[in-house]
Image (cartoon, rainbow, N blue to C red):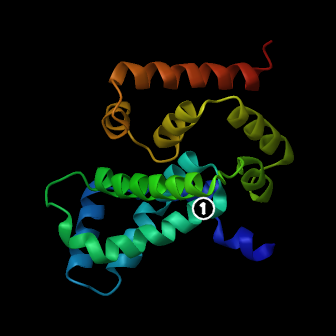
Amino acid sequence: MKGARSTMLDMTSMKKLRADCNPDAVEQCLFGIQRQESGALEEFYYRTSASVYGFALSVLKNAQDAEDIMHDFYVVVWSAAGKYCPGGKPMAWVLTITRNLCLQKLREYRKKSDIPQEDWENYIRDNGNMSAEDKMILAECLRNLTDEERRIVLLHTVSGFKHREIAKFLELPLSTVLSKHNRALKKLRKIYGGEQ
């Protein structure tokens, strides 16, 4: 049980890592990986892991699967870093690979007819940095968001992406992303504020 907790990124770590997700620095890490420089993959992991994990968790809704996707992602990056186009958007490239790995995982589940139940409650319960009250509030909030709303909120809040970037990445109109984000925030305010 303790081992499972130590491998999961907690919310505090994700917020700290999100701040270090500078596109220029991420791109330099990719160039370092291409040249197989010592420490480049570690630095890349440090700068991107919160975004990769948060996005995978928002798609798969299962903490263990999100961690598996993270592992697979860094293996793919190690072998595919040479395919990154300089001057591109490194975080869009990162999340495109993450999305493709998540979709592949979902296709595997569909073939087995074994789509996992939501694992948000387990993730929240295992997060030792939150008070019991905060855990209850967060679990209730997440249950009341649709998959798309949850994904947009996590991409914006956890991963730090702008609405325009989210719209492009999810292939949705900007107005749709904005309205779904606002709708999700209203739901969260209603739940958190205790309004009926």
Q: Is residue 107 above or below residue 72?
A: above
- Whether residue 18 is visible here, answered yes or no, is no
- Front residue of 50 and 57: 57
Q: Is residue 75 left or right of residue 149?
A: left
Q: Residues within 10 Å of mark 1 (few under 14, many from 20)?
A: some
Q: Position of residue 15 (x, y in %)?
A: 54, 52
Residue lying furthest bottom: 38
Q: Quadrant of residue 193?
A: top right
Rendered residue at 75%/24% (across/down): 191
Residue lying furthest top: 196
Q: Position of residue 154 (x, y in %)?
A: 53, 41
Q: Is residue 81 above or below residue 189?
A: below
Residue linked to disc 1: 65
- Whether residue 3 is visible here, answered yes or no, is yes
- Quadrant in which the N terminus is drawn: bottom right
Rendered residue at 68%/36% (across/down): 142
Q: Position of residue 159 (x, y in %)?
A: 46, 48
Q: Is residue 62 left or right of residue 19?
A: right
Rendered residue at 15%/60% (across/down): 85
Q: Is residue 1 above or below residue 160?
A: below
- Quadrant in which the C terminus is drawn: top right
Q: Position of residue 153 (x, y in %)?
A: 53, 35
Amino acid type for the residue under numbered disc 1? Asp
- Front residue of 183 and 17: 183
Q: Quadrant of residue 84?
A: bottom left
Element on which disc 1 rests? helix
